[in-house]
Image (cartoon, coloured by chain):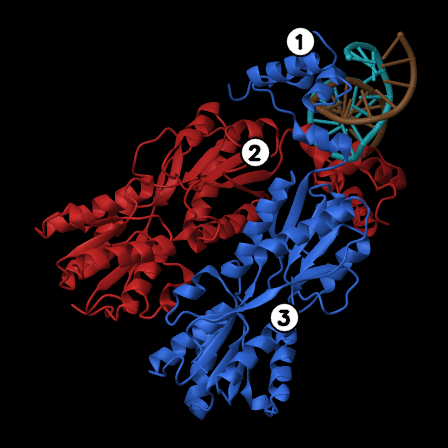
Chain colours: A red, B blue, C brown, D cyan
Amino acid sequence: MSNENKLTLAGLAKLAGVSTSTVSRALKDNPLIKKETRDRLQALAAEYNFSLNHAASRLRTQKTNVVAVILNLDDETDQSISDPFLLKVVGDLNQVLNKHGYELLLSNSLMANDDWANYYISSSRADGIIVIGQGKSTQKIEKVAKSGAPLVVWGDPTTASGYSVVGSNNELGSFLATKHLIEANCRNILFVGDPEHAEMSERYKGYKRALSDSSLEFNPNFTLSCDITSKDAYEKINDTILAKGLFFDGIVATSDMVALGAMKALKERYINIPSDVSIVGFDDIAMAELFHPALTTVQQDTKSAATIMVEQLLKQFKQQSADSVVVDITLIERKSVRES
Amino acid sequence: MSNENKLTLAGLAKLAGVSTSTVSRALKDNPLIKKETRDRLQALAAEYNFSLNHAASRLRTQKTNVVAVILNLDDETDQSISDPFLLKVVGDLNQVLNKHGYELLLSNSLMANDDWANYYISSSRADGIIVIGQGKSTQKIEKVAKSGAPLVVWGDPTTASGYSVVGSNNELGSFLATKHLIEANCRNILFVGDPEHAEMSERYKGYKRALSDSSLEFNPNFTLSCDITSKDAYEKINDTILAKGLFFDGIVATSDMVALGAMKALKERYINIPSDVSIVGFDDIAMAELFHPALTTVQQDTKSAATIMVEQLLKQFKQQSADSVVVDITLIERKSVRES
DNA sequence: TTGAAAGCGTTACCAA
DNA sequence: TTGGTAACGCTTTCAA
């Protein structure tokens, strides 16, 4: 029964001997319709395996019940769709969206090239947009915001912006991470990450603040700039040690993937973790506790984050204004930092 | 300019002083329309930031240009959306689909409860369905197949089925993995995974074949049944060693995540990998080479797989029949198996 | 409590 | 090479 005339609302109405309006309402459980009629029609629909044509509904109601989720990856680097943290956020968003009756249209920043609002909203592909990651440039995001399209961004909520940003307190997270290392008697702490990246720059600040709080001196030579990938971290750590020897005893990594790459480089040189070098990550991906040693890291609560992001988006659907909100972070102490 | 009357095709036509048919055709670059007219209208559309209402197109053409991708997870276990391999497949599918002008609607098996064909296809939410994972039961999948909806499944292509299945040669992969261990002089090889699971049962067969090929005896006590998660693998390995001691010198893991969990358990007991126990995984997730020791594993080529899956789906859109196809696997030798 | 009918914005057939 | 027009299948206002 693949392609022959699909049963429509009108067809069902005819079968039932009522009008399309009645069926439409009955299927939506509209109390306007007498309970018995509703029940009868719903049963009939079930019997005939009827399903509404969503395209027609959308056209009529001007509502898609779809949310576009855009993985905003930097084009050059290959953080790519393989970053487990980003994908976890997508997964959690999917769950929450489904619960609210919305579907998730997955997109990467490569498609719909420039004008996201136009591509997704004006063309009624989606009712709203969630962008994951502020990346290095927020141009495209601001364009969406300006268009007035419902928008929520996963990023750093503490920096001011004209749109709703949900994210962790990156500065605090990194501050706690660094402080934890200092308390474990690390004195030469390397920051590994990309300070130009929105969220990462906040983490950089937290790192600096922790240093100065403990009256340790900030030294720019202890900043190792690298992409948010294991591979790049691995290579950069290797290069650094090769060039300058092991001049650090602690690492603040801007993500667990970065930490993982760094750990690999260290292990290959038989540098002991945590006794020679302690390390703390960021994200708390599922694998963090499976590393050896288990990775001490700053946990981002993606479940709550997803819930909040969807809430903020739904608000905008109701013409209410949305806020930026900070999600709690927690330092998860495992085995990659030596006992203090 | 968020909500005031959006420019429609009719509006644009009026602006240009032509009919809607002409604009519609011009925007599709239909050669029926004179080149100059086409150019003029396209320029105008760009100028006014016009975008087609997709919902209307869909209703009219009965085509959505959307493919629903369903992560078919076993409800009970928490393989969940966090499995990096599954998510990689989703990512790769997204890329390929986009290239062909399709969008990816992400779904988990929890929604659209029973009747996927009805939910996605009849309701014109999507033109086709890609199911990732056959799981333990193929009921829902078969229901879709029976409905005649375009369908491709990521799973084990060697077992017969009435629909198109794309996947690796799981039996061969596991055979090679086991053989590799045997050549490294492992004599007591544990199989860790879930033999009831479609793909995994094929891997189980490969494991057995490799044993008998080397005239090693298959011993059911060397089958450790566990979920496809690190956590479960970790616990099961722990329990086993606790109960029976270290009675094995090799592990064939049904996924890298399982291997990772097993490795953690071994390391915690100071069992050396690879000299005491050698281990080989399956999937070759991005992190495999970052483990310590770097994980020897059977690589599944998700990029080709995604390409092939989309090809097979597109075929069905054109009313052609689709086949099951086997994707090549490769044993990637790293450091978790001792030198032979 | 139910029905008639207009209309959402396209596309494609047929006519010019 | 272009235009008029019906139709896709639903929702909702207004009337009964």
Question: Which residue does the image show at 42% across and 50% down from the upper left?
Answer: A304
Q: Nearer the viewer, residue B177 or A122?
A: B177
Residue pointed to by mark 3: B170
C-beta proximity under 8 Å, tags 2 and 3:
no
Task: Point out the tag, 3 or 1, that comes first from the N-terminus.
Answer: 1
Q: CA distance from mark 3 to mark 1?
A: 59 Å
Residue at disc 3, secondary structure: helix
Q: Nearer the viewer, mark 3 or mark 1?
A: 3
Q: Residue B339, how many percent across, how many down? A: 43, 80
Give the side of residue B137 with respect to residue B262, left or right: right
Residue pointed to by mark 1: B16
Question: Which residue does the image show at 50% across and 64% down from the upper left?
Answer: B284
Residue pointed to by mark 2: A127
The amino acid type, in three-letter code, at marker 1 is Ala
The amino acid type, in three-letter code, at marker 3 is Asn
Residue at disc 1, secondary structure: helix
The amino acid type, in three-letter code, at marker 2 is Asp
Say whether residue B274 is visible. yes
Q: Is residue B5 above or below residue B52?
A: above
Give the side of residue B50 with respect to residue A335, left or right: right
Subunit that carries the residue with mark 2: A
Residue at disc 2, secondary structure: loop
State the mark number for residue A274. none
Subunit that carries the residue with mark 3: B
Q: CA distance from mark 2 to mark 1?
A: 29 Å
Q: Could you confirm whether marks 3 and 1 are on the same chain?
A: yes
Say whether residue B229 is visible. no
Q: CA distance from mark 2 to mark 3?
A: 41 Å
Question: Which residue does the image show at 79% across and 44% down from the upper left?
Answer: B318
C-beta proximity under 8 Å, tags 2 and 1:
no
Q: Nearer the viewer, mark 2 or mark 3?
A: 3
